């Protein structure tokens, strides 16, 4: 078990730092928007969720490069790696026109969900700009799979750190602008607010993709993995990528879609509940997103060990990943329970309005929900990654689809009668509805953990192969 822990940490820690940088960028991005204009933070939350729903099925397909590459390495077939990367590259390029088209319908999509009228232009602008970076996000996911699949996760960490720093610097310039404010407009040069935040994120997506493409052109990589020789379209390999990746992508869209429905329902309650939810979710993301790195590590280690050494070492790696994930999540749960005020106080470092002060108080209470499910969230994420690494992607999809659908249906059918928080007589009803939706999120995560644990213990995944 000590060896398994060392192996997991060697692969997972750089990935956790990488994904942790992403969560930090999200947190700072939304905090800066709060300081610029409080309502922009909630708008970015809703629009960002819709962006992820729109791209995540394609990102999920591209993400399977890591697990498939790990099995090619385990089977001693390195020349197949270059072919797979090119299929993923052509797939990524084909998504760009679709993403741009979807982005043009952003305003109509937000109007369909009955969002507050003053938020819709901000949400639509943020969504439309982000969609130009969708193909870049798909491509960087596919190319980074080479480094996670070959266990060279330090490269992913360094690229992510560079991208994160670029994103944050662009945020500061493009959200707040530079120089003195114009006497007529009151705006600084390049002060774009929420649109600037979207531009910064879009540029960082493409920056990561370019970095990986340049690194893959190193002579040693080209020769060993047949990077240039695999440029032609290989329909059989493309079908394999889509067959194993589509369930992962659909799982992402199922979970993200369900969560977006819930966030949009909360958005109907008004600015204050949406701001409070965004604050709590931001801290949830700081804990959750680094665990995506642990999930990827579990996936590639299971994939390689199943081919090379059998299920025994694969099981030990999963147990080691769970131990690390539980310890990490427990630390955050303690912080959510005993120091919620200190965490939320980070949002008040810049002057805010009365509504934001109320949102701070509500967000402190919402962190209690996060404390309940954060450890189980780590469990379901790591076990789902292990199952995907073995090739059990269709079960992960179907189970996630069922649980997510039940959560949304139960939440919608039995939700309390809600009013807008801004209405004089509606605050109490809005808070009851807000609590209801957070109980739905908590039950959803707990059920996913139980289902994934049951499938893992059943053991059918141990006989699966993708190559």
Image: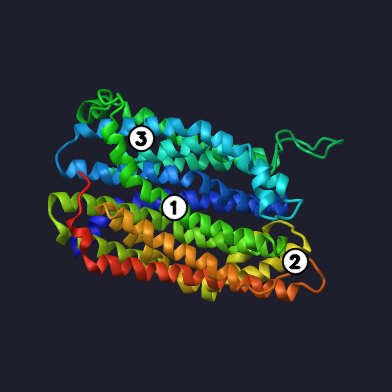
Quick check: 43 left or right of 321? Answer: right
Q: Which of 222 and 159 is in front in this view?
A: 222
Horizontal and vertical percent position of residue 17: 40, 51
Screen quadrant of the N terminus: bottom left
Quick check: 173 left or right of 64? Answer: right
Residue 365 position by quadrant: bottom right
Residue identified by numbered label 3:
88
Q: Which of 346 and 365 is in front in this view?
A: 365
Outermost residue, right side: 184
Task: Name the secondary structure under disc 3.
Answer: helix
Residue identified by numbered label 2:
420
Residue in view at x 22 percent, y 31 percent: 225
- Which numbered circle lies on residue 252? 1
As drawn, 177 above or below 246: above
Query: In this orientation, does residue 150 appear?
Result: no
Lower sequence index among marks 1 and 3: 3
Task: Name the secondary structure under disc 2.
Answer: loop
Q: Which of 292 and 106 is in front in this view?
A: 106
Residue 425 position by quadrant: bottom right
Quick check: 97 left or right of 148? Answer: right
Horizontal and vertical percent position of residue 330: 41, 71
Q: How far apart are marks 3 and 2 (CA)?
A: 45 Å
Characterize the local packing of mark 3: few (<14), some (14-19) or many (20 or more) Cα atoms within 10 angstroms.
many
Characterize the local packing of mark 1: few (<14), some (14-19) or many (20 or more) Cα atoms within 10 angstroms.
many
Screen quadrant of the C terminus: top left
Horizontal and vertical percent position of residue 77: 16, 36
Task: Name the secondary structure under disc 1.
Answer: helix
Residue in view at x 21 percent, y 65 percent: 459
Characterize the local packing of mark 2: few (<14), some (14-19) or many (20 or more) Cα atoms within 10 angstroms.
many
Pointer 2 and pointer 1: residues touching (CB < 8 Å)? no
């Amino acid at each position: 078990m000590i060896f398994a822990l060392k192996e997991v940490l060697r692969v997972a820690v750089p990935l956790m730092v990488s994904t942790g940088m992403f969560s930090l960028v999200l947190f700072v991005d939304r905090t800066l928007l709060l300081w610029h204009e409080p309502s922009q933070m909630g708008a970015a939350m809703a629009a960002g969720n819709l962006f992820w729903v729109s791209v995540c099925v394609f990102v999920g397909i591209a993400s399977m490069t890591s697990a498939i590459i790990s099995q090619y390495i385990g089977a001693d077939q390195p020349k197949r790696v270059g072919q797979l990367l090119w299929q993923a590259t052509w797939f990524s390029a084909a998504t760009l026109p679709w993403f741009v088209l979807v982005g043009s319908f952003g305003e109509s999509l937000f109007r369909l969900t009955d969002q507050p009228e003053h938020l819709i232009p901000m949400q639509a602008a943020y969504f439309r700009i982000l969609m130009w970076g969708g193909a870049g996000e798909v491509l960087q996911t596919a190319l980074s799979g080479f480094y996670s699949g070959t266990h060279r996760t330090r490269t992913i960490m360094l690229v992510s750190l560079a991208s994160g720093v670029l994103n944050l610097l662009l945020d500061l310039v493009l959200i707040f602008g530079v120089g003195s404010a114009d006497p007529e407009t009151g705006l600084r040069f390049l002060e774009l607010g929420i649109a600037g935040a979207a531009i910064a994120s879009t540029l960082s997506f493409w920056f990561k993709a370019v970095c990986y493409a340049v690194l893959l052109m190193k002579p040693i990589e080209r020769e060993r993995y047949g990077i240039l020789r695999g440029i032609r379209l290989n329909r059989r390999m493309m079908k394999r990528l889509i067959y194993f990746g589509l369930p992962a992508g659909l799982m992402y869209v199922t979970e993200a879609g369900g969560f977006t429905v819930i966030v949009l329902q909360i958005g109907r309650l008004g600015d204050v509940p949406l701001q409070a939810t965004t604050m709590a979710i931001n801290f949830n993301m700081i804990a959750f997103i680094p665990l995506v790195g642990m999930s990827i590590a579990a996936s590639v280690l299971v994939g390689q060990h199943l081919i090379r050494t059998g299920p025994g070492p694969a099981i030990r790696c999963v147990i080691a990943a769970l131990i690390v994930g539980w310890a990490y999540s427990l630390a955050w749960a303690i912080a959510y329970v005993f120091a919620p005020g200190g965490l939320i106080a980070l949002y008040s470092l810049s002057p805010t309005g009365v509504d934001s002060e109320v949102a701070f108080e509500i967000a402190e209470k919402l962190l209690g929900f996060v404390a309940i499910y954060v450890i189980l969230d780590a469990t379901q994420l790591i076990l789902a990654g292990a199952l995907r690494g073995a090739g059990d992607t269709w079960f992960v999809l179907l189970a996630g689809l069922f649980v997510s659908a039940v959560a949304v249906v139960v939440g919608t059918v039995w939700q309390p009668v809600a009013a807008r928080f801004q209405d004089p007589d509606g605050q109490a009803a809005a808070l009851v509805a807000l609590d209801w939706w957070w109980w739905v999120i908590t039950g959803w995560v707990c059920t996913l953990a139980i289902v994934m644990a049951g499938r893992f213990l059943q053991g059918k995944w141990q006989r699966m192969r993708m190559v």
